[in-house]
Every structure is written in C-alpha cells, then in structure tokens.
C-alpha cells in the first residue's frame, strides 16, 4: 500500500490573496519525476492556508509522512500542527525543513514530536530520504539530523545541487487540485530563474556566499507562459539578484510579452542585483513600460562605513547613486531605496544623517526602512557575532505587513535588534520615529514640496527640517500627528507587546507600517492636519502669498479618496521647479501666473480600496503623489488663467 505524504507550507493571507506553496511544490515535482508517486507514495495534499489546526488535522487522513516548510512566519503554527498530528498518528514521520532549520538540531532536542530535520535545499535530500526510508538506511541521506537510540545524529553536508533537471511544480500538474478549488485571482506565485547569492551580507540567510546556479531558460519561459494562461496576477521572482545575468533581460521581455498578450501576470516583482548596472536598468525599463513593476531598487541598507564593514557589504558611492537616479528619472522609471535600522556600527547620528543624505542625493520618490531581524541561518545570529557587537534583540509578535488578522491565530515571533554596542535602545526608538517622520512626510509626500522648496530656496537642510518637524509633532498636543506619534513611541518602547504596526477598520482589515497608517490618517483628515502644521511651517516663510500658494499646490498634489480633479492658482511655476529638483537638474523658481489642474484616471469612493491600491500597492512607484509620470494614471496640466 502506498504511503500518504502531505506537505505543509502555510503563508499569511494578504487581504484574500495567498501564495501557491512553491517550495514544497518544487519538492513534490522532483519526487514525481523520480517516480515516487507511481507505486511507493501518494501525494495526499498540501496545507497552505492558515486555518484552525484542529480543522486541518480532521482533513488529514492516515498520514505516513508530513513535510513542513518552516520560516519565521509559520514556525509556531507548524509546531502546534505537527504535535497534534503526532499525537493522533504516532507512527507518522514528521519532517521539518526550510529557512528556519539550521545545522544545529535544536528542534530535535526541544520537540520530541519532530523526527527528522533537513537543512538546505529540499528536492534532492527529500527524495534521498524517501528512498533510504524504504531500506531503513536514512543515515545515507546527506543534510539531515535525526534520533537513533536516544542520540541525535547529523549526516554530512552536501554541496547545493545542479538545477538543470529540476522540474516545475507548475508544469507537472502538482497544483492542479489547488487550481480547481481556488479563485485564480486570489493566487500569487513564485518564480525562480536561479538560486544562490555571490554576496555574504551578515544579516541575510538567503544562500549567502553560495555559487549562483541557473534553471534552464526554457523552463523559466514555460513557467511564465503557464502563469499567464492561469490568469495569475502577481508573480514574485525569488532570485536574490535578478539582472545579474544577461539572459534576465530576455526573461523580463517575455514576461512583458505575456502581460501584453494575455493580460497576466499583471505584476512581475523582482529583487534586483545589488550592482545596479545597465542590465538592471534595461529590465526596469521593460517592466515599467509594461506597467508590471512597482519600481527599481537602488538599495543602500546603511551609509555608515563602520556598519558596512561589520555586515560585509559595499555600497554604491553617493555620486554614482545620484547619477543613477538621474538616469532612471529621465526614463520616467520610479525608484525606491531601502535602509535597515539597527546594524552594528550604526549610531543615532549616522542613521538619521544617512536618511537625509539619501534625500540630498535625489531619492524623493520612495524610501523604506526596516528593522534589523536576527534570522536563524545568518552570520549575525552566531554567538560570536552577537557577543562582539553586543547585539540585544527582543522577541516580539511577528508583524506581517498587509496581512489579515485571523481569529484564534497562533502567534508567530521575530527577533528584532533593539540595541548594539553603538546604538542604545533610546536612540533606536528615536531613529524609528525619525524614519517614520521622513517616510510619512517626504517619501509618501504629505509635506514633500515644503521640504524641497525650503532646501533649495532657503538652504534648510533635510536634516534640520525633519528633526524640527519631529520635535514639533512630539510637543504639539491635541494634534492628529501628535496623537499618532505618541502611540508609535509607546509601542516602540514596549518590548512586551511588539505591536509595531497600525490598524484601523476604515483602511481595511490589514496591518500597516506606522508611516503608512500615519499618512492615511493625516490624509483622511487633511484640512485639520494642515491647520495643525501651520505654526511649524509658517516660521520658515516671510512671504504669506508664497506660503499659501505652496500650501495649495502641496494639497492638490496629494492623491486622495473621492476626488479625481483639483485645481489651484499660483504666481510661481512650482511644477517646473519641483520636477527639476526631483530630476536632479538645476532649478530656479520663476514667477508666472499659472492655473494647475491635477487629475487622476480613477476616482476612489472607498478608503479601503484607496489604501490598498495607492499606499500598499503603489507606494514604491510613488502613487501617492499626482505626478503625471508614465503609467501613474495621473496628470498635472498647466491651463490658461
């Protein structure tokens, strides 16, 4: 009789959307190719939605082997479900693999219901495990740990395998049952064109330092065609450095062809190569022209030389970064940059100044700042590294941005670095508040044009403007911004709750980053908010007419709910002035009587839909601002007075 094999790869639901279980599906496709499902094993099903564990256990019938894909977003869920399965089916073999499984077999020491651990990539190892199980010789399987006679045994590590004969879970019909049951519009998918990463960033566990291996080009192209044929809207390319190979341009072209021909996938999301070369630019242009990408990544992580040295990373020079921004802006391609808060060697001053140096170099479209997280397989999680840099992390509730909260949900956790040898917890809290301030008012754009004007015309540095703005917010009681930032400060100060996000039913049943929540709340109460900021802003202006006309221009530029057309009058050519600044060109504010008309292609009548499409989906491509940029669905026209 065939042995029943189940796979568990549970993800969070984004609104109603869910990823197909690609990792375990790839293992299943490999097993199918090797003939495991002919006579020996039965692929009994995939568990991929985060449902009550008791309901899942009831659906599982006579399992012989259950394989769990274990990551930070499902570790606790997997442990609860695995124990329940083991209690009901004591002879069932429980196998854990995935990013959270390290060479240290601590899961076996702490959880008696887990039988086998797999470290590293799973396809070849899982197949070898099944074959050796049948002959009672699993010790012949590389990359596993298991118990024998009360002792834990770990087998030798094998090199990552060649990928040339790895089949696709999409093309082999592995997901046919799922596709027959699910609404395809709710499904998200993963695409791999290669595996591995040539870099060794200390904070990362993404195949760090391993040679990069490619999947056959024909397989990748066939998978893209399949995705289009299934009307799947969102495709995440899981390469660590897409654009590192010349062929990646052809892959992007084919994805765009599928979009133009069939309408799918609507989004092709990538993690671009760290070196933003000509290949990356060409790919960005292809995807942007097809309306398939949120924007091109020009990543930094940190501008501190000490921190860069500590994390084994090298950055673009700011001069080269500025030149790249000019190039992308000239091609009408939105860009975004990312920083990580809490890297060893970073200080309060270097972090806040680093943010402003990014702005000074011309990054006005989108900036995202993330917490430093201790990932189990990263160099940073090793005891010697932690001791050397005095890393203090806190275990907090896992904040999965833009996911829906489930009833009776099993809580997941993250380990976030809150202090280092160079950054105290108090400084860490301030850096968070400063980054929220800059992202809310500059990157998302609520006061961006004020900051740009004052920097160019009055010589007010971005550092001075945003440190002063944050101080004003924290001390201005009875304002919308103060109430928001006060809550943020309290939550960041509490290591116990870890409730480090913003939720509000008016913007949907999802978790928002602090800056996104602040932006939405300020925008919804825009009249009150701008009145609140008037005492702060007016102190920079001696010309009342200029101030009020700039204020009108700023307000009209903000995309908002219920409105698709606004106009304002000005005695200044603000549009040309700001476009030149954003394009890193010489800029002079000229006096000219102008009527501006701000328009959007779509009018939103619901704040939930607006928040999802403009702030969540559109943040990185600058959708919050009416810019007239290509594929933005907005326009700014100059009309006769």
Image (cartoon, grey):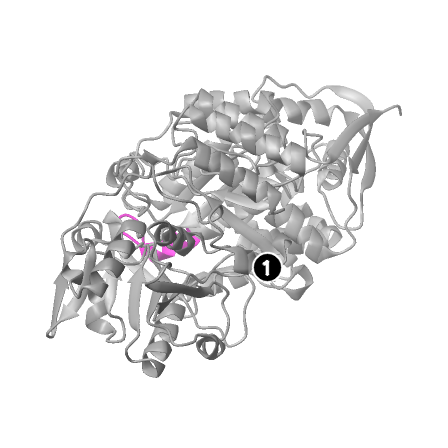
Q: Residue at x 59, y 59 (%)?
A: 180
Horizontal and vertical percent position of residue 261:
66, 33
Assign a secondary structure to mark 1.
helix
Q: Position of residue 606 (x, y in %)?
A: 75, 56
Q: Is residue 15 visible?
A: no
When the figure is inspected, residue 237 is found, relative to residue 409, above or below; the finding is above
Q: Is residue 330 above or below residue 137?
A: above
Residue sitting at x 40%, y 51%: 29
Q: Quadrant of residue 394?
A: bottom left
Closest to the observer, 66 or 565:
66
**197 or 194, which is in the foreground?**
194
Residue 351 can be seen, yes or no: yes
Image x and y of residue 578, in percent = 65, 27
Q: Position of residue 63 (x, y in %)?
A: 37, 73
Write down the region rendered in magenta: 418-430
Q: Quick one: which residue is furthest to the right in this view?
A: 641
* Residue hosting label 1: 180
Q: Is residue 296 left or right of residue 63?
A: right
Spot the residue most to the bottom. 88
**What is the quadrant of the N terminus in the image?**
bottom left
Is 247 in front, or is 12?
A: 247
The question of residue 232 being in magenta is answered with no
Does 422 appear in magenta? yes
Residue at 50%, 24% in the rendered image: 281
């Amino acid at each position: 009789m065939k042995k029943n094999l189940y796979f568990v790869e549970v993800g969070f639901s984004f609104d109603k959307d869910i990823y197909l279980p690609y990792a375990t599906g790839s293992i299943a496709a490999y097993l199918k190719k090797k003939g495991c499902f002919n006579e020996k094993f039965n692929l009994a099903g995939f568990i991929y939605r985060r449902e009550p564990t008791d309901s899942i256990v009831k659906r599982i019938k006579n399992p012989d082997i259950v394989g769990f894909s274990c990551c930070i977003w499902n570790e606790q869920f997997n442990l609860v479900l695995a124990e329940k399965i083991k209690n009901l089916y004591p002879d069932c073999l429980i196998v854990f693999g995935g990013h959270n499984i390290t060479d240290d077999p601590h899961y076996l020491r702490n959880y008696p219901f887990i039988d086998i651990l797999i470290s590293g990539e799973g396809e070849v190892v899982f197949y070898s495990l099944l074959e050796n199980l049948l002959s009672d010789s699993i010790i012949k399987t590389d990359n596993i740990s298991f118990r024998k006679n009360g002792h834990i045994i770990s087998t030798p590590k094998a090199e990552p395998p060649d990928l040339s004969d790895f089949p696709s879970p999409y093309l082999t019909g592995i997901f046919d049952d799922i596709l027959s049951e699910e609404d395809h519009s709710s499904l998200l998918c993963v695409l791999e064109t290669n595996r591995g990463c040539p870099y060794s960033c200390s904070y990362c566990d993404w195949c760090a330092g391993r040679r990069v291996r490619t999947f056959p080009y024909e397989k990748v192209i066939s998978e893209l065609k399949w995705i289009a044929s299934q009307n799947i809207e969102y495709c995440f390319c899981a390469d660590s450095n897409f654009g590192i190979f010349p062929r990646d341009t052809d892959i992007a072209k084919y994805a765009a062809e599928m979009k133009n021909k069939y309408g799918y996938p609507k989004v092709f999301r990538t993690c671009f190569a760290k070196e933003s070369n000509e290949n990356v630019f060409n790919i960005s242009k292809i995807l942007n022209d097809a309306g398939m990408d949120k924007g091109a990544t020009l990543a930094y992580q940190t501008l501190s030389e000490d921190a860069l040295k500590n994390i084994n990373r090298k950055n673009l020079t700011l001069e080269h970064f500025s030149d790249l921004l000019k190039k992308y802006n000239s091609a009408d391609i939105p860009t975004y940059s990312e920083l990580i808060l809490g890297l060893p060697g970073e200080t309060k001053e270097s972090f806040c100044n680093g943010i402003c140096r990014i702005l000074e170099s011309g990054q006005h479209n989108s900036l995202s700042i993330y917490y430093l997280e201790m990932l189990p397989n990263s160099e940073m999680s090793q005891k010697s590294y932690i001791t050397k840099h005095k890393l203090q992390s806190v275990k907090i509730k896992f904040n999965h941005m833009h996911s829906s909260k489930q009833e009776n949900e099993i809580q997941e956790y993250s380990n976030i670095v809150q202090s280092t040898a160079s950054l105290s917890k108090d400084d860490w809290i301030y850096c968070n508040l400063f980054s929220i301030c800059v992202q809310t008012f500059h990157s998302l754009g609520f006061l961006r044009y004020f900051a740009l004007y004052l920097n160019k015309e009055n010589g007010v540095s971005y550092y001075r403007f945003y440190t002063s703005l944050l101080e004003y917010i924290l001390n201005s009681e009875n304002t919308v911004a103060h109430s928001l930032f006060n809550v943020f400060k309290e939550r960041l100060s509490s290591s116990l709750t870890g409730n480090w996000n913003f939720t509000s039913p008016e913007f949907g049943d999802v978790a928002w980053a602090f800056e996104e929540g602040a932006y939405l709340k300020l925008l919804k109460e825009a009249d009150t908010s701008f009145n609140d900021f008037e005492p702060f802003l007016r102190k920079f202006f001696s010309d009342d007419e200029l101030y009020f006309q700039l204020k009108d221009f700023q307000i009209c530029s903000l995309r908002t709910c219920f409105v698709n057309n606004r106009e304002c009058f000005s005695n200044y050519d603000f549009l040309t002035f700001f476009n030149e600044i954003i394009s890193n060109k010489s800029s002079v504010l000229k006096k000219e009587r102008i009527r501006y008309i701000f328009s959007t292609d779509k009018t939103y009548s619901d704040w939930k839909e607006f928040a999802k499409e403009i702030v969540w989906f559109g943040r990185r491509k600058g959708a919050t601002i009416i810019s007239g940029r290509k594929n933005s669905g907005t326009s700014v026209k100059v009309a006769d007075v």
